[in-house]
Amino acid sequence: MISEQAEKYIKKMIKPRMIKFEADTSSWSIRICFDPDLEEQYIKSMSLYVSDRFGDSSFSFPIEDVHKDEEDYWIGTAIMELSSIKQNWFDRDYWDFFIAAPVDQSLIDLVYSELDEQGEKETGSAPAVNSIETPFNLTIRLRGIKPLQSLDLFSLYDEEKDLMMVPFYTKKNALSVRVEDVHVMARIDQASISRHFMLTLEGHVVFPIADVLSKPDLQKKIILVNRDEEVIAEWRAENVARPDLTEAAQATGRNYDWAGFSLAIDLKPIAAQFSDVAEPMYLYFRLELTHKKNGMLFSERPVRILARQKVITGRHIMKFKEAKKSLIIKRNRNHSLAFRIAPYTLADAAKGKVRRGWNRVRKTKVFTGLYHRTFQMLSHLPMKKNLVMFESFFGRQYSCNPRAIYEYMRENCPEYQLVWSANANYTDLFEQHQVPYVKRFSLKWLMLMTRANYWVTNVRLPLWMSKPKHTIYLQTWHGTPLKRLAMDMEEVHMPGTNTEKYKRNFLAESSRWDYLVSPNAYSTEIFARAFGFENTMIESGYPRNDFLYQKNNQQTIDAIKDRCGLPKDKKVILYAPTWRDNQFYGKGRYRFELDLDLKRMQETLGKDYIVIMRMHYLIADHLDLSDYEGFAYDFSHYEDISELYMISDLLITDYSSVFFDFANLRRPMVFFTYDIEDYRDHLRGFYFEFEQKAPGPLVTTTEDVIRSIREIEASGFAVSERFDAFFKKFCSLESGHSSEKVVKTVFK
């Protein structure tokens, strides 16, 4: 394969950009701009490549009608005939658009000759020349050129499936398509506040069902709600003619003549309701569309009002008695229109301005690069001999193996300075436990991390953090491997990376580890191979499991339940599934689907049981259990899962490594493996015969889960007949003294 440097060069050389999206009832036409230095024949060899986000399904369309425009750029067009692909499209949630550019040896030779010249000019040395055995296609994300065209008008509607498909731009202006339930799309075009605090809103709605918006007898209601979706106020909007939208979508046969709306709102009575707020408060705008359906008025469900471009009205100050409040209408992070009311003083306003400016600077590439170089320079400073820096799950938790090692050292190694690296959004957790911490990526953190004698963490650290020569890096990891890891993974389905890049980065990280903790001989063999680890393996059992042996008593269980506010007269089921690698919308944006039917479980088990949910940290923020109050509890952000193990009578999981730890308590487990074939054969695969040797029944439906729980209940909560063999292989090293073994090995 070619180097990452060469890949970036090719993408920059081609640099495809969408300049026009057109649609009619049978096809989509996408006009694309290419670099003027390319050859016409090479552009004709490219294709528009459309792939679902899991890589399971894709379509390819040739680039045609290649010609130069007035500014000498190449323009090509790809036409997507909808009849042949439309039904397949509605079977996936998201589709992304790429340009597939052929790469052969002649192109590689050209690229490396250019890189050679650049390398000699900039550094005095040239990059190594690569060769490829067979030509391949390099996929380049297709992005739009600003000003971005409105794509909502061209959504498709599938009457049979009652779904709609909407083309849209991502945050980085990449072209994508999403498939979702049919709903109105509300957009704000303009917002302003007068000196008398009158808010004027102008916008439009889009609906994929033909002619709904063609008549002036529509009713559009604007609703203002709080975070809990409680209605604060509502107003009837005025219909506005928008023949321009009809003209833009003319080829699709849609009529948007009366899609527009306008509204004037007096903000004074709204602000007066919240004149006593001591902290910034947000209210959110919704739009409800009512139209005739089968001869009767029908109201579509209220939807967020989104702003395609940045909308902010500026700060307006309103005085209430002696206090002042600032009022702002702005586009929120999720692009929805929001009303912010907050206390106002000149000092706070100045601080806020400085803070916002500093945050903008911190996000720039220049600052990031400078920060990384500063880390490298400071790593040459003299070390602080007894300083140990701890981190768990990117600074979001005080938990897992680092916590167990920290607590052992706190009691038994007073000569060491022990400091935690804490994510700035989770510092309350560390203050609650009264442990010394420093904010991750702060200037103080920079000084401590670069001079520390020891790093202790359970996940990978960023590669730009070059490990100082004096630092000893203890990697504890965070689970016994069931799923294939790192080098053993055939394909990587994660946002922001690909298989080759993921493995390359993983090897670069693992080469920095001086010590790696292993819970058993089985894990030792896998870790060494999958991580490419060649330094010291500590086969000790997991330090975090010491708690399960040292504190397994009724007094501890009751104390944890009291602290968590859980009833003591019901059995506790812990549901802790893993995260699927393909559960994402984009880099840093993860999707969540709960396949366990909590409603059905509540109906059949609610009298005797409660369920505590521990979801993977990447999707934990998406869990909503408001409909299951008193039965299901969200403990996804609970700092230490070991305490949840301790209070649980039964574990439901799937392919998460939690069952290896839970087995130390010798309590029953049920494996809810509804997608086992896909997970085993496509996503990860397993290291051992999971289906034959799992220490509990494997089930695929909620009804099977309920039946298994009843059978376990009838047996007096006995473990599976396969449990003893499993325990001997995976838990035999656990004795409650693993932390001690690790500390005596590393901190000599």
Image (spheres, rainbow, N blue to C red):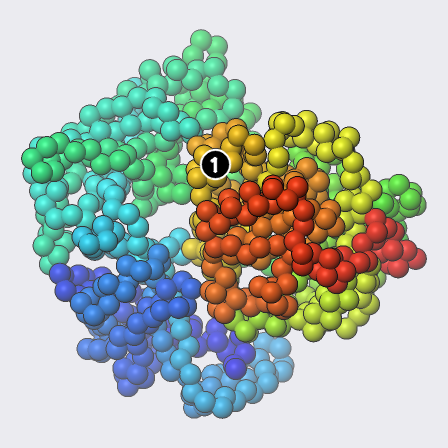
Q: Residues within 10 Å of mark 1 (few under 14, many from 20)?
A: few
Answer with left or right where residue 374 lies relative to residue 195.
right
Viewer can see residue 71: no
Q: Determine which residue is flagged by label 1.
A: 604
- Which residue is depicted at the point 42% across and 83% down? 136
- Which residue is depicted at the point 54% across and 26% down? 348
Give the answer, above or below, for where 396 lies relative to 52: above
Residue 100 location in percent, x, y?
36, 76
Residue 710 location in percent, x, y?
55, 42
For this rendering, which residue is in front, 612 or 435? Answer: 612
For this rendering, which residue is in front, 30 or 428? Answer: 428
Residue 69 location in percent, x, y?
22, 72
* Callout 1 secondary element: helix
Answer with left or right where residue 353 lies relative to residue 569.
left
Q: Residue furthest front?
A: 714
- Which residue is depicted at the point 40% across and 73% down? 139
Residue 209 location in percent, x, y?
16, 48
Instruction: Pick the quarter of the image with the C terminus.
Output: bottom right
- Which residue is depicted at the point 80% across and 39% down? 551
Find residue 556 and report its image quarter.
top right
Viewer can see residue 643: yes
Give the answer, above or below, for where 302 lies relative to 459: above
